[in-house]
Amino acid sequence: MNTLQTKVWTFTQDKLRNFVLRYTKAGRAKILAPFLTRCLHNDKRLNMKKVPSFIILLITFFTAGYGQDFRNQPRKLTPARGHYKQLEAFSTKPKSSTEEIDKQKFITDQETINRRMSLKPIYLTNIAVDDFIIPDVPANSSEQTRAEINYLLALQNSRTEEEVRASIYMADIYYNLRVKPSDSTYSRYRKNLFHIGSSIGSWFNPENLPLTANLVASVWQDASYFIWSLKFKYARIRPVFIDSDLKNLQDTDWAAYPSGHAANSYVNAYLFQEFAPEFTDVFIKDAYDMAHSREILGVHYPSDSESARVFARQFVNMLLKDDKFMKDFELAKKEWSEKAMETFVKPVSKKDKSSRIKP
């Protein structure tokens, strides 16, 4: 082996060592383990002329034979930060065992529950609501709930007209699962599916990415089923019922925990991240802004937002393990490879389009 080959192999050893040992320790690639050990120790019995062939074999083995294994590795949730992190320092326990306020729950009538739960999951059909591990709701009398309400009051004192306008606008960004193509609101609701990440390109819309729109709509049906299940399970009352000094700017007639707007937004962010990881910061920022807008309006505690983020990460991880979802995801991914780009062609104006329509 010449000097150049020696240098390349030394470099390759260093780069491959951690990768190989990680998977052999995890019980993978046991068939290759003896060969890998000799290789990493530069065993003289190994013909170094075959090193390039070995590298190709290694890559093929792990990507083709164990591609499914990589897919099933869960994406990690990034740690909480800012006021979400600070609030963790407060106790979530009741002030005492006799606090009347801790008996208050949001009561949902059975007809509403039946309607909400009538749309079953499309993908996660074998998942139960208790499979999601989110923090327990802080007691109404707890230190944390008081701290959260104080934070909302501080937001109330400092919120600007522009922040209120933007938050009210975002309150209307959701998807109606029962909407039909023949409905006048169909286009608006489909557009709402692309609110998270709307700045990444003019091509990012339901007209250009119809398969993606269909996929996200189906994902929303799954997510909504579990979000409502959690709301009914925890039945958390809204902040205004604990402190009347709060002037919430939206009427809500459903339970608070977790936040549906925040949960669906983070679901979209984590889903779109799989299509375009280079825009992860944009997707997460948009979801964060949606969650924070609910706090600006005074309708959600910060822990409603944070529990929604925790739920969303687990939910998308479960989707990535589901074969039916992955089949639809791969079709949408192919759509992105063909259409997720600017054309830089001058578009036809709306006025020109309308003038072409014959009376």
Image: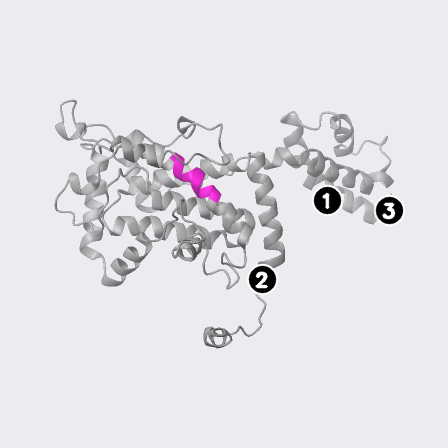
Earlier in the chain: of badge 1 and badge 2, it is 1
State how far apart marks 2 and 3 are (Cα).
46 Å
State which quarter of the image contains the N terminus. top right
Q: Are marks 1 and 3 in contact (CB under 8 Å)?
A: no
**Kind of element beneath mark 3:** loop
Earlier in the chain: of badge 1 and badge 3, it is 3
Q: What type is the residue that disc 2 sits on?
A: Met
Residue 60 occupies quadrant: top right
Q: Position of residue 220 (x, y in %)?
A: 44, 43
In magenta stretch: residue 222: yes
Residue to which mark 2 is pinned: 341
When the figure is inspected, residue 13 is found, relative to residue 132, above or below; the finding is below
Question: Is 242 left or right of 16, judged from the image as shown?
Answer: left
**Which residue corresponds to the image point at 54% horizontal and 55% vertical from the top-left?**
209
**Kind of element beneath mark 1:** helix
Q: Position of residue 2 (x, y in %)?
A: 86, 46
Q: What type is the residue that disc 3 sits on?
A: Asn
Q: Are marks 2 and 3 in contact (CB under 8 Å)?
A: no
> What segment is highlighted magenta in the picture?
218-226
In magenta stretch: residue 216: no
**Which residue corresponds to the image point at 78% horizontal and 37% vertical from the top-left?**
57
Q: Position of residue 123 (x, y in %)?
A: 51, 35
Earlier in the chain: of badge 2 and badge 3, it is 3
Looking at the image, which is closer to me, 156 or 19?
Answer: 156
Residue to which mark 1 is pinned: 11
